[in-house]
Image: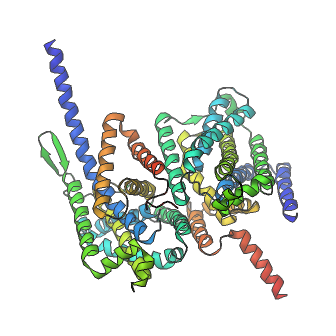
Amino acid sequence: MGKLFTTYYLLLATFKMILTQQLILGLLVGGLYGLAAAGLSLTFGVLRVLNVAHGELLMVGGYATFWLFTLWEIDPFLSLLGVGPAMFVLGLLLYAVLFRFVVRADEEARIKNSLLIGFGLTLVLHALAIQLWTADERAVTTAYSGAVLRLGPIAIPLLRLSSLLFAFAILAALHLFLARTRWGRAIRATAEDWEAAALMGIPVGRTYLLAFALGTALAGIAGGLVSISYSISPSIGMEWTLKALIVIVLAGLGSLFGSFAGGILLGLAESMSVVFLGGPYREVVGLMLFLLVLLVRPQGLFGTRP
Amino acid sequence: MKLVVTGILLAGGFAVLPLFTERNDLLNLGVQIFLAIVLAQSWNIVGGYAGQINLGHAAFFGLGALTTRMLWVGDVPLVLSLLAGALVATAFGCLIGVPAFRLRGAYFAIGTLGLAEILRITIGNLLPEISTIRVAELASYDILPRYYLTLTLAVLCVAAVALLVPSRVGLGIRAVREDEAAAEASGVSALRHKLLALAVSTAFAGLAGGAFAYYHVSYYPQHTFSPIWTFDAVLMSFVGGVGTVHGPVLGALFYVILKEVLALQWVEFHLIIFGVLFMLVVLFLPGGLVEAWKRARQAIARSR
């Protein structure tokens, strides 16, 4: 009898440890979900366009970081300071060539056309990435990649922790920009009501351009962090777009920290599912949540019924 | 009328092709073209005529393939297995159609994409083993029945859409696409017409999947649920001319042949070309190649 109890408590302790470990890993990856979602939510909220190529932009940022490190041994966290602005420029270009034509339409056609354009962009970026960089999986491996922080039996990968903190810092900086600067105010006003904003003399077209480029830069930085803490390949795009969409559906639009919290929530939900259902169903749990929320709010994310 | 004659001639040409050549690569190319036509045309019913961007088309293709393959390998006659595949795909379509059509525009698109992904991942987990046809079948494998089966399906699918579109139901479906509120006000039930379109669309997607299961010797069950099938269908329909009968056929021919020609040098290059064409069509030429052809002919006629 006593022996049975000992076994039971031993099992319970092991289970608790596994759960804690998984929850910490979920928290760490959740921060990146949040960062990816924040970029998508910015373009969605401000321009009312749904760029389903967001995950592919993330993938491009990941490759930029990877090659800067592999070819010139630039520290990945340092190179993000360059990848971010470069992706910003790419965002400017994409807006000028593609999305500029989409925002002219009325709201319903705008979302639908942007979805189609994003879809085309997805295929092109994916195929280009396979041509240029092969379909192999890649990851940045630095001298400090294996380092872990040990808290008793729990191990926290230092790199993932730094990525989480980096993501949070980027969002905090963006929050300050949106809250304190003139252009930040213009973006928020346009998000709320673009017609009123236009009447107040805000150049809506340029605000759209800025918001789109910022969203692209956020995707790029998120991709860089993914290539540091996890791995990238040309086909990760759709998975990350879906993750960002799930977070947006869970957390709603309009708040950067809301996206961050939503991302962490998704990360935690995934790690719970790993413990209770097993690893293979990790992705399914998020998608199920996503469909449920969509069904409860079929009018979409802006809260108004058509 | 001219289009009907062209269609019949094209189908007739494909039907007699095996009399003149025994080259397996040509016949295989034919099978791919016919499957692509069914895939694009079936997507076009919901995506083009009903105006609902369905990004979960692969789920129905996959369900058809899965059902047909399981039954056929288990000694059920082929025709019955194919019909069962179509039935399962349609049943699933009707089941998810009611909740899914509550979603509008882009939300319908991402909702169906999410649903198809759930199915793909689950099937990948449940059936991780490669599926191969029986040894007896393998020994007597002949491309000809596959060729004629897929050709028949393509003809049936195009004919079904051609007959459906001018009918009362077809008019209702298009009315719902143009203005749902106005259609409802005229007594056309939006949900019923969308569901009907989805039922026809998923039946043909299921048949295409079943034909794929009959055609391919071995593949991973998860592969038939891959979003590639959806994406191909969307590309072919849009570039050819979405919401027309001949557009998806043209798109499918163009797509498969381009893919075949380019595959020798650059595996994914056809996707880059079609991706760019697709974006151009969405932005500047909503009628696709069919529209471009019409405009070009008008321009020539005017200049005379």
Q: Is residue B34 above or below residue A304?
A: above
Q: Is residue B287 above or below residue B22?
A: below
Residue farthest left in this picture:
A152
Q: How is the image coloured?
A: rainbow
Residue A58 makes an appearance in the image: yes
Q: Is residue B301 left or right of residue B172?
A: right
Q: Residue B199's image quarter?
A: top right
Quarter of the image containing the N terminus of chain A? top left
Q: Nearer the viewer, residue A61 or B111?
A: B111
Residue A138: quadrant of the picture: bottom left
Extreme residue toward the top, this view: A1
Q: Position of residue A178 (x, y in %)?
A: 29, 74
| Residue A188: image location, x then y, percent | 34, 73
In this view, the residue in front, B131 or A23, is A23
Q: Is residue A158 left or right of residue A195?
A: left
**How far across and down, in percent of the image, does residue A158 sit?**
18, 54
Expressed as whole percent of the image width and height from the top left, the position of residue B256 reads 67, 58
Figure disc tally:
0
Regarding residue A142, the answer to whether it shows in the image is no
- Left or right of B227, for residue B28: right
Residue at (40% x, 55% y) in the render: A249
